[in-house]
Image (cartoon, rainbow, N blue to C red):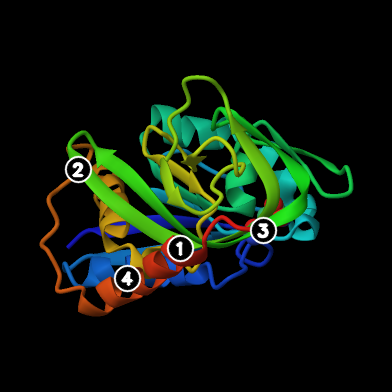
Amino acid sequence: MTTIRVGHLYPDYLNIYADRGNIAVLAARAAWRGHRLDVVELGLGDAIVPGEHDLYYLGGGQDREQLLVAENLAGKAEALCAAVLEGGAALLAVCGGYQLLGRGYRGRHGEEMPGVGLLPLETLAGERRMIGDVLLECELEPGLRTTVAGFENHAGRTLLDPGAQPLGRVVAGFGNDGASGYEGCRLARAVGTYLHGPLLPRNPRLADWLLAQALAHRSGGEPPELEPLADALEARAYELSAGRARSRGGRF
Ligand code: GLN
């Protein structure tokens, strides 16, 4: 049994669309394989200590909540970058959390929020919110192709730097900016995405990929092959979301 140490950043501020459900999924899927998730809440007054956590999690938030944490998080940029880029910790950031991992976010009313600068991107809020189900085509590992479904609701338009690796190609939905055809961003073991829902209950392959990355950080070795699970309910949840994305995603 391995204890996977999760650092949940600002759970009191960044938690909309039941983003906490992502943690519940990671905990359950770890337990079904005989592992344990130890989730520590990292708030405004807590330091990030590289090496202390195998996986970091940042949920979504409205511009108002993002403003309350942006500067505090930017002050921890060096530690978070060291933990992920040098230390190899896994990270999942959703929507508001994803935006704050880039160089910065300019909110709906011109608020300038500093970012962590971990992901090669920046975000500007646009006039209209991009709302609806999304379907992506992703390649989690070379040759490991999968589709990912979720729900997006954001005013921010995220622009990836040239050469940045998106999480996936948009099959249906808006994605990062409604124009590029890409969604999310990946770097090392970090994944940023606009997909709520929450994301992981309907995308078990992505959940297992993250768990395997966190286990690799814990052991210092390769990501392990996780024993497959039945996932019948998960498949139904995915199908429902993917179907909605195909029929009406990406439209204002
Ligand atoms: N406030 C950000 C936006 O509207 C993120 C919203 C969210 O996390 N759903 O773009």
Image quarter hosting the C terminus = bottom right
Up/down of 48 relative to 86, above or below:
below
* Label 1 element class: helix
N-terminal label among 4 and 3: 4
If you read the primary sequence from the N terminus, does the residue marked by circle 1 or circle 2 appear first? 2
- Residue under numbered circle 1: 245
| Ligand 1 quadrant in view | bottom right
Q: Residues within 10 Å of mark 4 (few under 14, many from 20)?
A: some
Q: Residue at x 36, y 70 (%)?
A: 201
In this rendering, the label closer to the viewer, 1 or 2: 1
Image quarter of the N terminus: bottom left
Identify the amino acid type marked 3.
Phe
Which amino acid type is shown beneath numbered disc 4? Answer: Glu
Q: Which mark is residue 252?
A: 3
Q: Earlier in the sequence, mark 2 or mark 4?
A: 2
Q: Residues within 10 Å of mark 2 (few under 14, many from 20)?
A: few
Q: Which residue is farthest right?
A: 109
Relative to 143, is 170 on the left or the right? right
Q: Residue furthest bottom?
A: 233
Circle 4 is placed at which residue position? 239
Disc 4 is placed on an element classified as helix
Element at badge 2?
Answer: strand
Question: Which of the 4 image quadrants contains residue 188?
Answer: top left
- Residue found at x 26% / y 50%: 146
In this view, the mark in front (2 or 4): 4
What type is the residue that disc 2 sits on? Leu
Report the front residue among 133 and 62.
Answer: 133
Question: What's the residue at 83%, 49% (across, down)?
Answer: 108
Residue that badge 2 annotates: 144
Between the residue at mark 1 and the residue at mark 3, the CA separation in whole angstroms equals 13 Å
Q: CA distance from mark 4 to mark 3?
A: 22 Å
